[in-house]
Structures are given as C-alpha cells and as structure tokens.
C-alpha cells in the first residue's frame, strides 16, 4: 500500500472522505481550500482514488474487493475498513486533535466503513465529528434505509454528528440538473467542515480556539450548524436569520440546544457592538435561556462590507433528526410478559438424614450425673371425691360405638350433600322449566299415591245445618266454605 504524504508539518485537524460521496465532497473542499487542514480519502474503488487530487489516499479492502468497490453492501464496506485498521490508525496518530469524517450514507463503502474509522479516531482520544448526508428521494428507498441504519451506528462512535438531508436541498433550490444537485450537496458538506475548522485556524479579535470547540462538541451527540452572510441595512439580523434557515439545519429550530458556538466575521466594514448584541440576543431567544453561548469575532478582508455568521448548536437527542425518529418508531415492538413456570420443590420421602451405616462413624456420648432425692410419699387416707360429694364415685364404663353404623350415617349424609350440590349446579333449559311448572313433582318422580275421591263425589261434606229464620233448624245442601275451585 502506497501513501502519497507531502513533506510538511501535519495539521491537528484532518478531514477524511469515506466512499464515493465522501470522496467527492473532500475533493470539492480541497479545491475550495480550507486553511490549515489535512485531507484524506479512503475508498474501495481504486479508480475513484486514482482520479482524486487528494495527496493522502487509503485503499480499503484491497484483498477483499480487489479495488472494485463494495457493491452497495455496507457489510462489505465494514469488512474492508477492518482489513486496513493499521493504516487508518497510523494516519490518524500523526498529531491529530480533531477529525471530520464525511460520507454520503446509503452506499456500501461510506455506510459500512465510516463507523469503523470513527471508532478508531475516538479510541485514540481525537475529537471526532461526523458530517454525513441522507440520499435524495429519487435514489431509492433501499438506499435511504441503509443510510439511516448507518447513521444510527455512526452516532455511537462520534462526539458530534451533523446530518444533512439532501432532499431538503431539493426543497430549497427546486428541480436542479443532476450534476448541480450533487454539487450543492458537496458544497453544503464543504461549508460545514470549513465553518467549524476555520473557527479554530483563523485568528480573530475575540478568538475561539480548539479548547472552546472541544467544550461545545465533546460527547455532544447530534449537532446542528448554519451559516449566512448579509450586507447593507440590518445586515446583522439578516445574516443570523439566514444562518438559522440554512440547509444544514433540518428543522430550522435550535431550541433545546445545550451549547452554542457562534463565530462572527466581518470585512473592511467592521461589525459594531450593537450588531454583535443583535446577533447574540437573537440566538439566545431562539435557543432558550439555558443554552450556553461561546462566541468569537474574526476578520476576512474578502468579505468587504458583509457580515458572515456561523453557528454550531449541540446537545440534541436523535429525535431532532426526523428520519432517525421515524425509523426508531417503526421498530418498536410490543413485548408480552414472559410467563415463568414455578416448579414445585419435590420433597423425597424416607430421605435419610443421618446415615449411621457408614464405616468410621464416630458417635459422641454425653454423660449425665443423676442425683436421687428421696422424699416420703404422703398417703391419702380419704378419697377427694368422697370428701367433696359425700359418696363414692360411680364407675363409668366406656361407651361402645358401632363403627359400621357411623360409617353408614356419614355415607348417607355425604350422598345427601352431593345430591344437593348437583342440583345447585345443574343448568336448566326452557323445556326443563316448563316441565317443573306444569307437571307435579310426584308424577315426575313416578311416585305411587293413595288418591282420594273428589269432593264432587262426596255429598256429605255438602250439607250444612243452619237456622231457618223462624226459630227452627234446617239442613241445606251446598256448603259455602267448601268448593272445588282452587284460589
């Protein structure tokens, strides 16, 4: 493996482009120029490496891919980076304090290799910042899904992560030609890396150094960045408003940020104190009163009468990236509680606790000294019962119990209870209820009864002896108190 390393002092800030998209972005940065920054590219595609003007190149997975790319397979890109861990470590170990890892997520090399390179940098104690893009929608859903999964893995190995959704560029700039669309994406990545790096490398009146950047970005999670410039009347507010509507800010909202790094640069027409106050007040209102703002001021003659503002807000959760939030919500599963079967402890009967049949068993002996105390026994001359009641107690013979009789009584009682229990648990249908209401119990049970004659056939109960009203008596038929009708 050959490295084209120029003979010059290595910068503390390095930018690594991984894969095709990351390599194109770094090529664009190299042509634009970023002060005091070293550029590196790593790719599985040997042709892309050969065409790049970047001096430091790493051929990833030469044995695995033979220089023909990762075939849009992130797992293959990951294995390719693992194959070259030593080369990656050697390049990053050369006086590196901060590294930008840029990649177009969704393909094979960038998606798979970027997290591996980030982990190497983080393990070396380097301030690691990921700047990655989510593909345009026309690139396909599979590529977008791979990008989101790659970003989810990358965020575990970087201090700060800037995510740029290319589809937002389409919303801002409209329907561009294909080459122009990808050029816009490269330009946004360049703006992000250049904006952060030159906060450190370009000296200003109120200087922001590497320690300030490290305070804001170390282990900060998801970061958002914006930049804007303006001139003329109200240039300060115009510049900061443009920065907060930058394509780098997915949702244009920095509220909830924990730390904010703000760099204001002016040209020949220097910024005034009131203009600085307008910018810082606007940022504080947008971020909330709890955000800690570190700001610096620089000079760039090429700006003329313009003001340039760069803002970096950090400390957001992954929910601030809509694509990652939507992906995590679709992966939520409802997990039912696991039923744990409790096994009953089996107690074996006749378990031998002490086994005295074993040989060499020594039995201990305990000796007691027994003392006998002799006392005279007092003989009772009288019986206590006779003394209390004045007569001898009658001897009572134990009552004999016939066990067979008791058993039969218990059996009969049990059968009675069982019959009642069955009746109480019997479910009655409509036919059963009709039978109970219309048929007498003795007929249902087929019981024989001594039927007596009806009162209509017995005339004696029909006669009544009463007064005839003339002082005499009469015998009349038809007793009003007896009749055949049932009330």
Image (cartoon, rainbow, N blue to C red):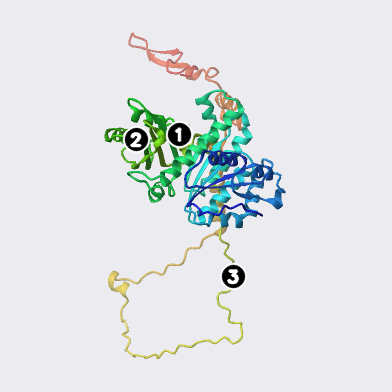
Quarter of the picture containing the N terminus is bottom right
Mark 1 surroundings: few (<14), some (14-19) or many (≥20) residues within 10 A: many
Which quarter of the figure has residue 281? top left
Q: Is residue 88 left or right of residue 197?
A: right
Residue placed most toward the observer, 306 or 393: 306
* Residue at the spot of label 3: 350
Rendering coords of residue 466 (x, y %)? 38, 15
| Residue drawn at (59%, 70%) of the image | 350
Disc 1 and disc 2 in contact, CB within 8 angstroms = no
Rendering coords of residue 6 (x, y %)? 57, 52
* Residue at the spot of label 1: 249
- Relative to residue 5, is residue 234 depicted above or below? above
* Residue at the spot of label 2: 283
Q: Secondary structure at mark 3?
A: loop
Q: Is residue 345 left or right of residue 297?
A: right
Q: Is residue 307 left or right of residue 439?
A: left
| Residue drawn at (41%, 42%) of the image | 314
């Amino acid at each position: 493996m050959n490295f084209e390393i120029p003979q010059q002092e290595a910068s503390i800030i390095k930018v690594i482009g991984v894969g095709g998209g990351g390599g194109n972005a770094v090529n664009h940065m190299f042509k634009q120029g970023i002060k005091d920054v070293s550029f590196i590219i790593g790719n599985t595609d040997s042709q892309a490496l050969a065409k790049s003007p970047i001096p430091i190149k790493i051929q990833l997975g030469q044995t695995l891919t033979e220089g023909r790319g990762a075939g849009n397979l992130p797992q293959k890109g990951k294995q390719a980076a693992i194959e070259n861990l030593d080369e990656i470590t050697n390049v990053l170990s050369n006086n590196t304090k901060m590294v930008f890892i840029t990649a177009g997520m969704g393909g094979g090399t960038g998606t798979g290799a970027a997290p591996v390179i980030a982990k190497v940098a983080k393990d070396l104690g380097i301030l690691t910042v990921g700047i990655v893009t989510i593909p345009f929608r026309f690139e396909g859903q599979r590529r977008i899904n791979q990008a989101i999964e790659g970003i989810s893995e990358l965020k575990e190995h970087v201090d700060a992560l800037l995510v740029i959704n290319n589809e937002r560029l389409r919303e801002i700039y409209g329907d561009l030609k294909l080459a122009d669309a990808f050029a816009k994406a490269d330009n946004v990545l360049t703006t992000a890396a250049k904006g952060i790096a030159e906060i450190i490398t370009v000296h200003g009146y109120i200087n922001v150094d590497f320690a300030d950047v490290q305070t804001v970005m170390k282990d900060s999670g998801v970061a958002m960045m914006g930049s804007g410039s303006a001139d003329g009347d109200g240039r300060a507010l115009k510049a900061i408003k443009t920065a907060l509507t930058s394509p780098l800010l997915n949702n244009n909202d920095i509220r909830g940020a924990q730390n904010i790094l703000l760099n204001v640069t002016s040209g020949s027409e220097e910024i005034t104190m009131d203009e600085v106050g307008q910018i810082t007040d606007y940022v504080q209102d947008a971020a909330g009163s709890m955000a800690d703002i570190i700001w610096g001021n620089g000079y760039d003659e090429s700006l003329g009468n313009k003001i340039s503002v760069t803002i970096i807000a950090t400390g957001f959760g992954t929910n601030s990236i809509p694509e990652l939030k939507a992906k995590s919500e679709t992966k939520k599963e409802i997990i039912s509680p696991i039923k744990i079967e409790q096994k009953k402890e089996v107690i074996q009967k006749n378990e031998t606790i002490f086994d005295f049949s074993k040989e060499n068993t020594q039995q201990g002996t305990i000796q007691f000294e027994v003392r006998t105390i002799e006392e005279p026994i007092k003989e009772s001359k009288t019986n206590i019962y006779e003394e209390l009641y004045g007569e001898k107690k009658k001897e009572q013979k134990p009552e004999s119990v016939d066990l067979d009789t008791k058993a039969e009584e218990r059996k009969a009682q049990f059968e009675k209870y069982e019959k009642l229990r069955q009746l109480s648990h019997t479910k009655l249908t409509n036919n059963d209820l009709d039978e109970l209401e219309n048929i007498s119990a003795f007929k249902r049970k087929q019981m024989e009864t001594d039927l007596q004659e009806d009162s209509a056939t017995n005339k004696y109960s029909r006669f009544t002896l009463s007064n005839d009203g003339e002082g005499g008596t009469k015998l009349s038929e038809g007793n009003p108190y007896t009749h055949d009708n049932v009330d």
